[in-house]
Image (cartoon, rainbow, N blue to C red):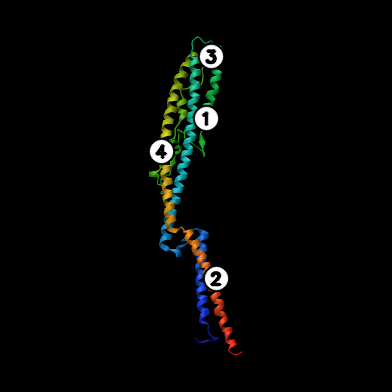
Amino acid sequence: MVVSIKSNSSALIALQQLNAVNKELDSVQERIASGYRINEAKDGASSYAVAQKQRAEKDGYDAVDQSVQRGINILDVSIRALETLSNLLIEMKTKAVQASNPALSATDRQLIDTSYQSYVAQISTVINAATYDNFNLIDKNPVTPATDDLRIISEPTASAANAIVIPAINIKASTSDMLGDLSTLANATAESTAIDAMQQAVNSALATLGASNSRLETHSGFVKKLQDSLSLGIGKLVDADLGFESARLRALQVQQQLSSQALQIANSRPQQILSLFG
């Protein structure tokens, strides 16, 4: 081998090896830090493109899930309100039947009516309070009914044609025949009939909203499965195998030490030339 101070091929080779190890070490550390095998397009263009498409699709289903969950919450509030109304109507029916007794004196009927008025006041309170996120599904505006319907995104394209629409209910309309007054025998009798009609309307609304709630719960479960499938698909495309990367990191660290030592040895060789002239 020619000994020269003009060139040191051993040092150049050792430096190239060290640079290659350092570059690979940086890549491994990036994969471990991010958890991704493919962080950007240069790491794998096709896999990155497919993953980005699936991420966008998953984001769409995240929006769908939020819309569905909002709908479920609105329905829950509405159903609780209707159940409360049903219980109030049972109490009101009892009062109306009591006031329908011909044997009652005017004073006794008035006492019953006074108690009855508290239930009447609660009807409007419950209906008005059945609001979630500024939306009341059981207080439909008869002037602009369509705007009060609950519309829920069912798929990522947010197509209006595919939206789940739950019609709003004007439960107050069923109180129109109620006098709110048991002060006379005739009023008590009429009020009893009106209460039956409203109870029927409330029960019908409960059946409708209960079915809608079940539909949304089913759709929510379906959407979550799609979200999980997309997450798994994205993971298979871009996630790093941290067990493998950890082992690779240790191996590269050893190679880095050996390459550094080899470079030190190669750089010391020109010093040996001095011994030839000693």
List x then y, in percent, for residue 39.
Answer: 48, 61
Q: Check disc 1 and report its element: helix, strand or loop.
A: helix
> Please, what is the three-letter code of the amino acid marked with disc 2?
Gln
Residue found at x 54% / y 79%: 266
**Depth check: 122 or 179 in front?**
122
> Please, what is the three-letter code of the amino acid marked with disc 4?
Arg
CB under 8 Å between callouts 3 and 4? no
CB under 8 Å between callouts 4 and 2? no
State how far apart marks 2 and 1 are (Cα): 75 Å
State how far apart marks 1 and 4 are (Cα): 25 Å
Q: Answer with mark 3 or mark 2, whichever residue precedes in sequence.
A: 3
Q: Quadrant of residue 161?
A: top left
> Please, what is the three-letter code of the amino acid marked with disc 3?
Arg
Q: Which residue is mark 4?
A: 215
Q: Nearer the viewer, mark 3 or mark 2?
A: 2
Q: Answer with mark 3 or mark 4, whichever residue precedes in sequence.
A: 3
Q: Answer with mark 1 or mark 4, whichever residue precedes in sequence.
A: 1
Residue found at x 49% / y 32%: 80
State how far apart marks 3 and 2 are (Cα): 100 Å
Mark 1 crowdedness (10 Å alpha carbons): few <14, some 14-19, many ≥20 = some
Q: Check disc 4 and report its element: helix, strand or loop.
A: helix
State how far apart marks 3 and 4 are (Cα): 46 Å
Q: Answer with mark 1 or mark 3, whichever residue precedes in sequence.
A: 3
* Residue 129 in sight: yes
Q: Check disc 3 and report its element: helix, strand or loop.
A: helix
Q: Which residue is mark 2?
A: 257
Residue found at x 51% / y 62%: 30
